[in-house]
Image: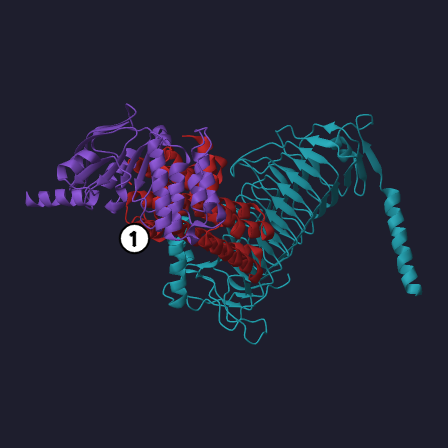
Amino acid sequence: MRGICKIVGSFLFLLTTLFVNARTINVGKSRALKSIQSAVNISENGDTILVDPGLYKEGGIIIQKSIVLKGINYPVIDGELKHEILFIKGKNIIIDGFRLQNTGRSELKEIGAIMIYDSYQISAINNIVDNANFGITLQNSKKCTVKNNSITAYGKSEVQSGNGIHCWKSDSLLIIGNKIAGHRDGIYFEFVTNSLVWRNISRKNVRYGIHFMFSNHDTYIGNIFEENESGVAVMYTKFIYMYNNYFLNNWGGAAYGILLKDITDSEISGNVFTRNTSALHMEACSRINLYKNSFTNNGFAIKIQASCDNNDFTQNNFKGNTFDIGTNGSLVLNTFNGNYWDKYEGYDLNHDNVGDVPYHPVSMYSMIIESNPAALMLFRSLIVSLLDKSEKLLPGITPENLKDERPLMRPLRL
Amino acid sequence: MIVTKNITKKFGKLKALDDVSVTFSKGECIALLGPNGCGKTTLIKSLLGMVVPDNGTIEFNQSSIKNKWAYRSRIGYMPQIGRYPENMTIANVIDMMKDMRKENNTAPDEDLVKSFGLNNMMQKKMSTLSGGTTQKVSAALAFMFNPDVLVLDEPTAGLDPLSSEKLKQKIISEKQNGKLVLITSHILSELDDLITEVFYMQEGKLLFHKKLEALKQETGEEKLSKAIAKIMSEQEAL
Amino acid sequence: MNPDKMKKLLKYVVADIIQNKIVLVYTALLLIISLSVFNLENSAAKGLLSLLNIILILVPLICIIFSTIYMYNSAEFIELLVSQPLKRRTIWLSLFCGLATSLSIAYFIGVGIPILIYHADATGFIMIITGLFLTVVFVSIALLSASLTRDKAKGIGLSISFWLYFSLIFDALVLFLLFQFQDYPLENIMVALSFLNPIGLSRVQILLQMDISALMGYTGAIFRDFFGNSAGIILSYVGLTAWVIVPLLISLRKFKSKDL
């Protein structure tokens, strides 16, 4: 007991000495220090800079000391469409409560509102980023937090706009509660490991809601990806964990709720896929467990290429999709068992909620449409129903092994 | 009243009417006679606008009926076979006809409705009526709107003798009112008291059109049926 | 035409047809199917899907056959009407409107009301509207069959052929075409072709509601631009209206010069 008291006591002492030494520096139109950069220049590690409300037309503020830069009532820092706004390289830095707008634009170099390089324990929280080329970028950094920022751009094409939150070669990042819209990719990860992406909303971006590659051991929970031009695409990654995310309303020939390419050893569970042209598209994926997801009112719920193997689909709900599963080959190395399919027409004599005959989720017409997209216009016509019915009786084109041996009679409560 | 000039009608190769010119005048009761398929019905249908002749003109009160329809408010037509929408009641049919022809502001003539006893079965549906009762409805409708011309196609076929007699009396009284009556019938004996002229057709051609009196004198027969039979046998002989 | 007389005649014709046993059975049949579909299926959306085939297949079939038979059975009645001071146009249009109105009422009671009860959303409304359009279109085609031949058996045969053509053969031909020319971009042609079949046109309207996610993916710019915007939707209904008017006008022309 005494030992604990001693430790707490010494910790409190340390803390007070820290506060005694730390200063608070005010910046504002009516203050001695008029510009943020001048305040940063005179600050020392541990200082807090408080910025009054107002418009600060200064780009290229460089912060390399361990300070807290805090805005009062969202002071505006304007890059005047010429330069980047905050350039950060250091450790233990907090950027909190600013409105950062109008960064420069370049096709050669990444220009962003908050640019974090080679850093450790940086937090960017509660900022509003408006009309930036890149919103917040992190490169070669560790243990950084990007939280509760609202990042909006007005990109028209992929070439001209940058990403909302752009992370490269970093580790242990927390990307939490941000709202991103109108960028190229809402969130972009390349070589980012051991990170958490939680409760972000990424919508109406000109390319992907989230885009990552070579980013192992990351977890994605409770994010919403909606109405992005091409949905979500993730590639070349192992050990990803995606739980309870929403993939909504991604429409278009090349739009996917989520596109998985070369993803292995991962878990995808509890996600909701609604009204996407292709909800889940898988290429060269292995050993993914997909369970307890719901697929509702999509064009295709799942498109799985023959290059995928050892993926396991179980306890998912499939409701109101135009087609449940599409595939491009007859080889089936994946398992589909114990899912609920609303198109299942079998029976359950022993009332154990498991259908007594298998369900074949690939319809013949879905295969016809794969090779001849214009034929979709005939969908739901009598001739197509007859073709599909006859294929069900005498399978010829559809892969016979792609079936759910234990289809559920009632939807799961997900 | 009605004048046809050189009307011709072909159905395929069959000449139903072949250059028929005729004048039907007011106050006459004319029997249209001739063997089956001689063109009587086609002639009637031409007058009513159901069949459009290939050539020739038909005038009603000095004006051509081609592409006209209003003149038919002056005609009462009783078809040979009356079939009505099956779920209409007698009252429906009569009301419908009144609605269709209301431009004649005179009160409808419902003598036949009463004398045939139709007013006691007004709510019966047409599909439940016997052939004879249906004919009674047709007859009542033909006379109802005080037409100047009555076209009756086999009017007494299917009627019981009593009703048949009532209809004949009605025809006679209308004739006396100065109306033109055209009748086709196979039962020649019925026509004796009714008609004033005979119009005889064969193979689409008009064979003769004579006053009944003149016909009787020529043949020396008292009965129409005998007179016609005599003419037909003379024809055979030729 | 005399609209006043037409209205009156229409009233009697409608009253006659809605008391017709076949129409009553048809209404009851639709009602039973609709209610059982909505009650037996797990979800109302799935019920709607099952109803789709009823609307696209059964409704046109019943409408065209019933109307054709009705027209032939009314031959003597039509003769009687022609002998009255009525224009033929008035008679023909009254019969058309009578059939269209009665069968539309039957459809609305049998299918429309259950949809409104169980699935009153945009898809449901489109299904009601296209079903009503198909009803009227196939009455119009029935009148065309009836005006083309005097023989009842031939007329009914012709009607069944029309139905078979629009519900099955046309789509089979299009499918064949698609496979023959699958290396060519056929979207434009598909849009044009869909106007040649009233059932197809109706189906596309329903597809746009039910399978919009899938359609947005495949059809490329043309389908999306054409059927996806309001001008395309309006044009589709103009197309359906043309399918009502054109057969009707042809049949009217035939009827006007027809010997009864």
Instruction: List x then y, in percent, for residue B219.
Output: 13, 39
**Front position in the image: A404 or C165:** C165
Choose top left, top right, bottom left or bottom right for residue C125. top right
Q: Secondary structure at mark 1?
A: helix
Chain under disc 1? C
Rendered cyan, the chain in question is: A
Please tell me which residue lies in front, C251 or A125. Answer: C251
Query: Which residue corresponds to mark 1?
Result: C153
| Quadrant, the N terminus of chain B | top left
Q: Which chain: purple?
A: B
The image quarter containing residue A294 is: bottom right
Chain C appears what colour?
red
For image coordinates 40% across by 55% down, the residue present is A382
Q: Is residue A402 above or below residue C138?
A: below
Please tell me how crowded label 1 is: few (under 14), some (14-19), or many (20+) other residues with Cα within 10 Å.
Answer: few
Residue lying farthest to the right in this orientation: A2
